[in-house]
Amino acid sequence: MSHNHSYKAEIKKLPASGEVEIKSSISAAEFDAAVREALEEIRKGIELPGFRKGAAPEKIVREKVGETALLREAAEHAISHAYGHILQAEKIDAVGYPKVSITKIAVGNPLEFTIVTAVVPEIKDFDYAKIAAKENAKKAEPVEVTDDELAKAKEKMPDVKKEDLIKEKEFRALEKKRIALVDALTGGLDIVLPDMLVESELARMTEQMKHDIERMGLKFEEYLKHL
């Protein structure tokens, strides 16, 4: 596919979610070219009875693959190509994986589509180091486990040891400190974090927490029961 195309795009900011919506289209001529390219790529790798690999006639390959699958394959490549050009032309600082919706697709017609993507939040006058240093300077309270706490824990988990409870308390204290730091860092910011980024970060933090807990010899499921 040629790399000298320009694409008209309608850009709409979605401030509530920290995303932008892109509505655009690919000309009928360019989409038809994308379909031919997709068909040729499929033909090269397909094996059909009576033909050598890559030697089957396009008509037979097209019938075998199906029109819908062929158009979808062509659309995927065409939109991916157009998306990069649109981001560059419109100076959109996108992050994460975009949500793509094809709104019109047919042979001999323009390919129309909508893309919703998260964008990097704009942050101004933010002294990260100063805020982080202030939070990290706060002294942590000593971690202790009383005999009464140990006895109550043993009622639910007979094999639990005092060292296990100390580790759990230390981990909770560390998580509390992390949350306090995040709150301090984001408290003075007038920004909206994209939903896509929030979901991705929550998943990452959950996996990290699970890893940290299991590394201390504790069971993640048991830890959650005591939250």
Image (tube, rainbow, N blue to C red):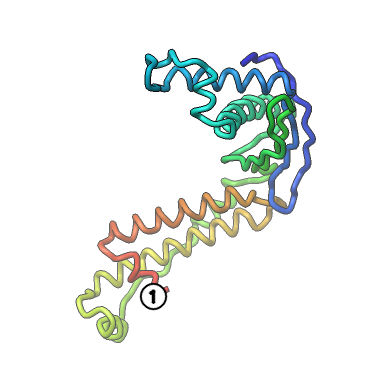
Q: Dividing the picture into quarters, in which one does residue 225 lie?
A: bottom left
Which residue occupies the foreground of this view, 123 or 213? 213
Residue 73 occupies which quadrant of the picture?
top right
Judge by depth and name the residue closer to the eye, 3 or 217: 3
- Along the line of sight, the residue nearer the viewer: 6 or 51: 51
| Residue occupying image coordinates x 43% and y 65% | 140
| Quadrant occupied by the N terminus | top right
| Amino acid type of the residue tagged 1 in the rendering | His
Residue 45 vertical placement versus 16 (above, below): above
Residue ID at (69%, 31%):
106
Across and down, in percent, residue 69 comes to 55, 33
Quarter of the image with the C terminus is bottom left
- Within 10 Å of the Cα at label 1, are there few (<14), some (14-19), or many (20+) other Cα atoms? few
- Which x, y percent locates residue 59? 54, 19
Looking at the image, the residue that sits furthest to the front is 50
Q: How many marks?
A: 1
Indicate left or right for 153 with 44 as reference. left
| Label 1: which secondary element | loop
Task: Give the x, y percent position of residue 39.
Answer: 54, 21
Q: Residue at x 57, y 40 (%)?
A: 97
Compared to 116, does 212 lie above or below? below
Direction from residue 202 to residue 190 in the image, left or right: right
Residue lying at 78% horizontally and 37% vertically, measured from the top left: 11
In the picture as drawn, the residue positioned furthest to the left comes out as 159
Q: Which residue is mark 1?
A: 226
Is 14 drawn above or below residue 181 in the view shown? Answer: above
Decide which of 54, 162 is in the foreground and name it: 54
